[in-house]
Image (cartoon, helix red, strand yellow):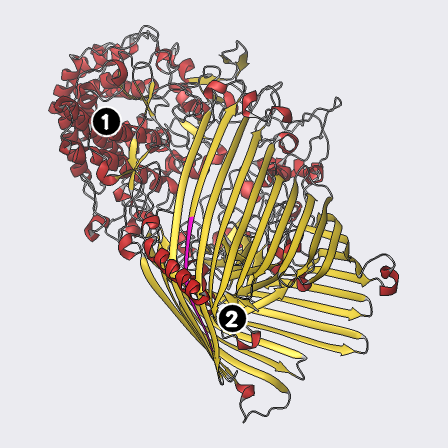
Amino acid sequence: MIVGYGTQQAKDLTGSVKQISSDDFKDNATGGNSTLALQGRIAGVRVVNTGSSPGAAPSIRIRGTTSRNSNEPLYVIDGQIVSTGISFLNPNDIESITVLKDASAAAIYGSRAAAGVVLITTKRGIVGKPTIEFSSYYSFDNMTNEVGLLNAEDYVTLNQEWYINAGEEPNPLTPAVAGDTNWLDEVFRTGSQQNFHLAVRGGSENNRYAVQAGYFHQEGLLKTTSFDRYSFRVNNDINVGRQFELTSSLDITYGQRARTSEGGIVYRAFQYPKNLAVRDAEGNLVFAGPGFTLGHPLVELENNGYDQGNLRGIGNVSGEYEILQGLKLKTTFGVEYSSNNSKNFSPIALYPTDGNNVNNRPNNSLGVGTDRLFVWNWDNQLSYRKAFGEHTLDAILLYTAQESDFVNYGLFARDFLTNDPSLHVIDASLSLDELTGNNGRRQWAISSLVGRLNYNYKGKYLLTGTVRRDNSSRIHPDFRDATFPSVSAGWVISEESFFDVLFIDRLKVRGGWGEIGNERTSDYPYQSSFVPNNTPYILGVNQNQVPNVVADRIQNSALQWEVSTTTNIGLDANLFDNRLSLTLDYFKKDTEGIIVQPEFTALFGLPPAFQNTSHIRNSGIEIAFTYADDIGELYFEISPNYAYVKNEVVTLSPSEDLRDSSIGKSRVGQPLSRRIGWVADGIFQNQAEVDAHATQLPNTAPGDVRFKDLNGDGKIDADDRDWIGNSLPPHDFGVSILLEYKNFDLNILGVGQAGGDIAWDPFFGYHNFIRPLEITGAALLNRWRGEGTSNFLPRIVKGDPNTNRRFSTLYLEDTDYFRIQNIQLGYRLPQNLIEDWGLTNLRIYTAGQNLFTFSDFNGFDPQTGYTGYPVAGSIYFGVNATF
Amino acid sequence: MKKYNGLTILAMVILLVSSCTDEFLDKQPFAVTSSDAFFTSEQDALLAVNAAYEELKRFKHGGRNDVNAYDATGLMWSGNVHEHPDLVSTFGIVRTFTIQPTDNLANHNWWRGYVGIQRCNQVIQNVSEIENIDSGVRDRIIGEAYFLRGLYYHYLTMWYGGVPIVDRLLDPGQEEDFVIPRSTKEEILALVKSDLEKAESMLPTSYSGDDVGRATRGAAKALLLKVLLWQKDYPAALAKAQEIEGMGYSLVDEYTSLFDGSNENSSESVFEIQFAAVTGENTGSSLSLIYGPNGEGMVPNGGWGFVRPLPDLVNEYEEGDSRKSATVFEIGDTFTKNNGSVITFEDRVNGTGFGTRKYVTDPPSGTTVGINYAPQNFHEIRYAEVILLYAEALLRNGQKDAAVEQINRVRARPSVDLPLLDPGTLTDQQAWEALYHEYRVELALEARFGYALRRWGIASEWYASKAGIDSPLTEFENFKSGKDEVLPIPQRQIDFSDGTLDQNPGY
């Protein structure tokens, strides 16, 4: 099993480590994204899927959210730390993924490993004649959940009711061209994905190679969105003599996304008037009339040009020299280069320009940008491995350094003749004299010295100790140098002579403790300085712009490392002739001195300093087991996993520990980002109920929400709010099932979470109660319309005199779900048949991704809410062939 | 030999490790000047004082993007307007006197005020230490900072009553600097007076060329006049008003030219917040956009109609007062755009039936950028107000006839040309009422009248007299004497202060 800076046998591990291989996730299950390969397979690892926007990168949380800075794990590909995630990586290239969850396992990676480490090994050469592997798939993608919107008639009725309930004349709502449009249908389509991947592997004893090339193309659910990725990888392993080995890995990837404004278009499609035709008789788009302030969803969809390209090259060369038997010196130099280019065209006529010339927006604009990240990374490592009788010793001394340099440039221009894509270059601007630009740069560097010792006695007693000293440019020189130790031990009880439980084949208990530093915040958090203010003032008879300079924030030179301390206790067991394997872990992780910029008194008149203030504790359990057996010719494996994470804020800066009016606040003793709000308690059915209840607002009337008078003082005010909702679901579970029968294989992966909720407007309309034209959700048909009609949804009324829109339990919806993430049926064609075609393996399969979701959630998807890009459900057809 | 090679490599590695550890870790941010390298030249002093002006643009706004140059409190307290329905929770709560300590507006005003004060304190504290600077320029810059600090504190005390005094740069190492208690309103006014008196002595009477728009001695005197009236130091106020009379200010002929950008920094201008329409920069004013009637298409981006004049304001204008059509649109009124197209106001969004006219202009073509595109300066103090303050000082000193003469000067502006009031036929009370009327219509939508009601001490009676008028567009009857003269102290700041700050009565 791959561990940091070396390999170790799984049976000898003392930390919390889990590895999965490419066989586990198959190449089709990931929707072209390497991050998704981890979903549901490892207890305590959650992939936060932010929607199926082509080319978007989901994020990973290992053991929950612990810092208030970056919670993204550290990614290491073929021994090289990468700064920009792994979403660019072609999943077909991957041989295995290892996740280091606890501090003792991750300690060797130090400062950036506080949120865990994801180690990826790509396919390498194998001795023998060249084998050619080809794989391909095609998919059809659809939305996982439909969202109900009002039809034109109900839309008009509800709009008028909004005025009538306030005693006003209703707006006649005469559409420019009448129709009955569900704008979601106008902006979404059936998407598709196609993938081609070729790998050639082979070599001699002294020179092994793997060459891989891939192409992935995706058409998104939202019209005009797409993603193309071209990937190339060459891995080489060369032995020079018996003592020297040279290894190189090179990956070049280019990805191109066509995005438009995604979430913005979805939002506008929700809100745009339903009683409007899409186009008039001449085929021109019809715009909503006066008073409607949102842009037209199709104008933006058809004309907004937001494209992003990313070129990434990652390469490293490593030489290892065996000085003496067991004593090795290894040096690895790697470079990461990543360059983004973006183009964002904002079209003309988002709003109507005709007739009433309402909301006339005469200028179109184009922003282009490019950036460049260059990182070098150098590891020098001396390792010694030796067995003395029954003692085995494995020691590493490592010096590692990394430097990162980021530069960005941007240009912005207005006034283009038309929206035509051929004009989407700055040179086409009619106002080149008013071109604006920007350019910035930031750098960061770290160096560390690490020692690690593994000791193993008779395979029974296992001990690992690591000490790491980090120096980061982000910390003031006086506090820059910090040392973080960790230690872990294991005891393989089943190796003891006294152990004779027959059904237990192997039993190991392990425990570990370790500290890891984190400083992933701004690149210059401790400095304070004078900076040019981004808006000039105007002075002089000629109205000149005058520059001005302001202090940027309060200085805190004493800023120090944020430290997370993890304790982990675990158990690994194999039972019943190794048919059942079981892993249990308990962990407690305390992140202290978290670097934040806590708001404090306004008296200083400056943004606050970065400070080490909060302390967050995550604790939890993880259970995973696998049962594998044969029944006749049927082989099966079932692997459920479950994780529970309890999140608690232990301390905050004094200024943050406030019961504040806004939602999504933290408080000591509560999970991070809990919400504070009122507790809705049904609807006032008549005036008598209004009168009988505590005073809410002067114009509260029947049909309004009754809020609980939690402090019983007879009036509903800010003091009646309570902690409601939890945006961090504590329960995660997954299950994977593999069945093999003769030439058939069936893989099923289920994923779920529970205990969390999302704050939003599940009815699509109340959040916009002040703009009746944006009342939109079909759920509003169940609103209160008179005594006894509803005890859940309030009336629709102009002015919202009871502020029914205030944040209350009405606006929480639980996000519990269980989903068949992937189900795949494969068939290997008989060997005698394919040999004639020159093949050694040919497998065809069909698969479904996200096809079945069990959830009460009303929006597109419990993971994304409703304004973002929806999650796709896909049906795949694919083939894997080996020549 | 092979063993020797290995040891050589090992030695090289160790050498590299020890040699390159430190230097590459020293990273300094780009595009900034470190704190100890600033405030060393005249240019630095200018850059810093310009920042103290720049904050004025942000200081008086209530939210929604970076919309600047409006003062929700002043506008809504003036009782002249109703707000866009989207602004119930920002403007509406001020109009209906339902603002809570937890509302963002309360905290926003407080925050921006202390940002402005900090920028002034940077200048006051550091510029005097600069050696490489002409002493005349140095004194002027410090004088500007005193004027601006006085202006910021003047607003803070009108909004909140007493506030904490921060008259130096605070030290984050000192715990007591985080929890400064409130001073009384009288103490704040005394500080403002002292700042303005320093400014008065250090500032020039006028500027030329590139410095036009900076604070002048006249601006300091005019604000001081207002502060003396707040302090009820009436003899001093009258003396100050008379000093200003000798400074050469005069009313411009054309009332509308004050607000359409055609007459910037005019003879009537005492202090203007300076704006210019520059493509790509937020140097313009957003006032034209946010005042521009909603859904009528008069200005780029449609006009947001944040405030809509109430019928009561429209009725306040006398027959034949041309300032009405310069201030509001009535249904059927027209607006001519730069391209010659004529738009008729129809109140398409079912507002109050009236639209805001003052400060609404179609910007010069080609400069339409974002929301801050309007070129007009905003009048922080103009001479018409100074004349009315003079009248107020005269009335306070029992000189009714002289006061009415001053009110008549405002009515006699050529483009206004209303019948003059006869001092002899007016009682003292009627003279006061004439002042109230003139103040309200002359300065309508400039966010002045609400503060004046409080300075005059008649807020309670005035709002009570308007109870029920224009209902349901207004809720004047909610005004509670002893509470609604000021805003609540922001709850966040009370919490930050560890309870050192106390809340205003009634909140």
Q: Which mark is residue A871?
A: none
Dominant SS in magenta: strand
Contact (CB < 8 A) between labels 2 and 1? no
Is A629 in front, or is A461? A461
Which residue is label 2 attached to? A16
Q: Secondary structure at mark 2?
A: loop
Report the front residue among A403 and B250.
A403
Q: Position of residue B212 (x, y in %)?
A: 26, 17
* Location of residue B236 in the rendering, given as x and y in whole percent from the top left corner: 11, 24
Which residues fall within the magenta stretch? A393-403
Give the residue at mark 1: B43
Q: Residues within 10 Å of mark 1 (few under 14, many from 20)?
A: some
Q: Amino acid type of disc 1?
A: Gln
Task: Give above or below for B407 relative to A192.
Answer: above
Q: Which chain contains the residue that carries disc 2?
A: A
Q: Position of residue B420 (x, y in %)?
A: 28, 8
**Residue B464 in sight in this render:** no
